[in-house]
Image: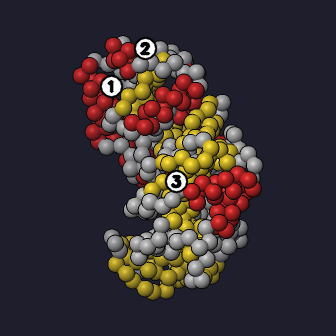
Amino acid sequence: MGKFVEEIRELDVEKIVQGGMGLAQSDGKTFFIYGAIGGERVRARIYKKRKGVYFGEVVEVIKPAPERIEPRCAFFGECGGCTFQHIPYEHQLRIKEEIVRETLERLGKFEGFEFLPIVPSPMEWEYRNKMEFAFGADEEGRVYLGLHRRGRFDVLLPVAKNCLLVSEEFRKVAEAIESMAQGEAPYDPVQGTGYLRFLTIRKSFYQNKLLLGITVTQEVSPEIFKFWFEEIDRRFPGLVAGGYMVVNPGGSSSQGEVKPLFGQTEFVEAIGDKKFYVSANSFFQTNPLGAEKLYSVAMEFAEFSGTETVWDLYCGTGTVGIFMWDRIRTLVGIELIPEAVEDARRNAELNGVPVVEPETCEKTNYSVEGACFVEGDVAKVLRQFAEQGVKSPDIVLIDPPRPGLSKKAVAKITKFSPKKIVYISCNPATMARDGAMFAENGYKLVRVRPVDMFPQTYHIESVALFVKK
């Protein structure tokens, strides 16, 4: 927690930095200001000091940047969902591009690498295939669905019927569920009362189908939710693939044991020409059209010849490796979560990828033609591979969690001396840090390309190619 401070300051903003905040310097102090654009003079309310840095938000734009526009959403600035609606999309791309470049140069100390222009998202709006809306109630007791106010876990804004990051189907279904939920008791995270917690909507762009999930904090009769799903199906024929209920007593997430109530428990989504099963608890890229762009850049960087052995680390449900399968001889996916490993095998089979049994993979030292999926921690599995004398891969694909790689994982990866490492990042700072560790272990950063998967937000994906010196 930062120290609470409260003051109003006039500041000249230099630029937008990672996290979407405007950077300003004044009287020897550093300020990060929400809602500011580089080149603006603003009046800001400073509300927090943490580790010698001050944080604030714009209360008045004294001198606006020429790029500033009116946001489309009435909740922008309050809602935590978007950070860049006041900036034209082309300028959003330039900001993200510069953040990636500057982070690599400043934190990673990299120079002399090829930096390719950012790849824009195919859709600027309505691109998300998943949204989790929380149930709340206003002072009159009217139930609504919304997202949290920026920086607050206990305050909801009724944005579900208006959110522009999702398609019209999401908004109409949310509105219908709101109307049916009147008289029910939304969960209050402060008081710990109520039971209605989340509505999760997932969409298959490929099939134009929805999966609907209701999360509750205590055991309740599922019949009411079964009725809701049936009524949604009646109002929107052919749209709903399935509906389910999750009981999560803590109320902190929508994850938990899935209780099917209507229709199917999964649907099929596509990335490029590859198909993937998606169910209630599956991790899947939230911008599938953008994911095709992202994986295509990674495949371009890898420059497969068709004879390579490729290790896909932190493979999740197998999307990256399966997307590239047509240019690979041997694919070895490693993933910690057992359910994800099983999903990876099913997804491979769905796309005609020959899935090799674990015993055969071990007997052939993971050199058999086809796909091997291994359950376990990446660093531990690679240590076992070294002990078993498994041959080094030609190329390693890495799409790590947001915190990036541990020193131990980097050491295990580089010990195998793959010719190329293709690193997919959702965090420029951890990419710079991990890249510096690769450099210390004999790899050179050759090429980087940002890919925008999340328009209207500060989030940035990037692909980096490291080659053995």
The residue pinned by badge 1 equals 416
Amino acid type shown at disc 2 = Val
Nearer the camera: disc 3 or disc 1: 3
Q: Nearer the viewer, residue 469 or 129?
A: 129
**Position in image of residue 327 (x %, y %):** 56, 21
Question: Toward which corner of the image does residue 132 lie, by quadrant?
Answer: bottom right
Amino acid type shown at disc 1 = Phe
Left or right of 178, for residue 259:
left
The residue pinned by badge 2 equals 368
The structure residue drawn at horizontal position 45% and vertical position 52%, both measured from the top left corner, is: 255
Amino acid type shown at disc 3 = Met
Element at label 3: strand
Left or right of 254, for residue 169:
right
Could you tell me if the residues under marks 2 and 1 are in contact, i.e. CB atoms within 8 Å? Answer: no
**Position in image of residue 184 (x %, y %):** 56, 70
The answer to whether any part of residue 157 appears in the image is no
The residue pinned by badge 3 equals 245
